[in-house]
Image (cartoon, grey):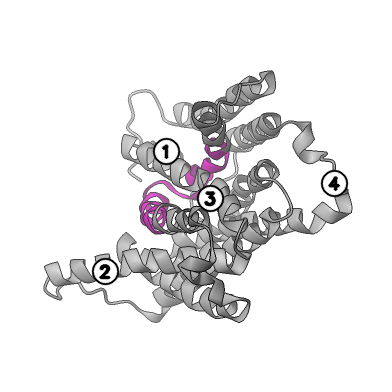
Amino acid sequence: MSVHHPTADWVRLLALTVMWGSAFMLTKVSLAALDPDLVVAGRLVVACALLLPLVGLRLKASRGNGRPVWGARLWLFLALIAVFGNALPFSLIAWGQQRIDSGLAGILMAVMPLATLGLAHYFVPGERLTTYRVGGFLLGFGGVVALMGPDALLGPSSSEARLLPMLAVLGGAFCYAVSAILARLRPASEPLPSAAVTILIAAGLMVPPAFGTGGEALLPAAIPWASLAAVLGLGVFSTAWASIIYFHLIKSAGPAFVSQLNYLIPLWAVMVGIVFLDEHLQANQLCAFALILGGILVTQLERRRMIPRGAQAPNA
């Protein structure tokens, strides 16, 4: 059954587009001076420094009455989300971006909706593969390819040297798809403490490796301010706030709706380049805009066909 998505879901989707769409650029800036493990550990530590005090303030405001009571099943889900939604994809994508450009990484990440649709079909009740969804997402993926152009896929470096980095980013995309399903299926919990716990677990997994591979470089005096600012931006916006919004959105809208981020993120990257970097819009980019927006429209058409005229859409 198709579900009508309220305006709040679209606002959250656009907010995540900005936060996660900027992460590729911030990661690239960070990698200019830091190893991938340090970038990942740094963003997770910054996110923890923001989220944990917020949880403490909420508990204090509720005088302890709002303390969550979680069972073993929820803890298991949150631990798995920490691995597949944070630690593992952050590491894979950061490692891959050392050797391939951000445009190619964006193309590779666009396979995430297809993986999410396939997993949701089997594991999430009501999230069926339909002709509209498959057609819409394939159309959007074509838009992402058109946006980047053939040069992103056929760069000057040898294909052998780029194979492992591309597979790493693809692995990160699949991890995000698994995380989307886990977040949808997890037992009910509040977004803020859920985000804080997953980030804390992920930080616990990633900080020891970072200090084992040159962790002394975390000292501010040892790295450029640009890289420090990039890690701070990754931690505050692309990790902490994005995690809270993500938990809200995955609960209300479902993983298939959230997967549209992978089409909007390249769109955001083009707009940032035009406004702030004085880049020019090419013909293939105009074509990509039409394909991406057309793909999103196609995925929404099934709602109009499946809900009888005059009937109300079911609540999310």
The disc label shown at residue 157, or none: 4
Closer to the chain start, of discs 2 and 1, is 1
The disc label shown at residue 53, or none: 2
What's the residue type where badge 3 is placed? Leu
Closer to the chain start, of discs 3 and 4, is 3
Drawn side of residue 29 relative to residue 1, left or right: right
Q: Residue at x 62, y 64 (%)?
A: 36
Q: Position of residue 39 (x, y in %)?
A: 55, 63
What's the residue type where badge 2 is placed? Pro
Q: Are marks 3 and 1 in contact (CB under 8 Å)?
A: no
Q: Is residue 54 above or below residue 121?
A: below
Residue 240: quadrant of the picture: bottom left
Drawn side of residue 120 relative to residue 157, left or right: left
What's the residue type where badge 4 is placed? Ser
Are there few (<14), some (14-19), or many (20+) residues within 10 Å of tag 4? few
Q: Position of residue 102 (x, y in %)?
A: 65, 45
What separation in Å lies between label 1 and label 4 (alpha carbons)? 34 Å
Closer to the chain start, of discs 3 and 1, is 1
Are there few (<14), some (14-19), or many (20+) residues within 10 Å of tag 3? many
**Magenta stretch: residue 81 in it?**
no
The disc label shown at residue 26, or none: 3
Q: Which residue is mark 1?
A: 14
What separation in Å lies between label 3 and label 1 (alpha carbons)? 18 Å
Q: Nearer the viewer, mark 1 or mark 4?
A: 4
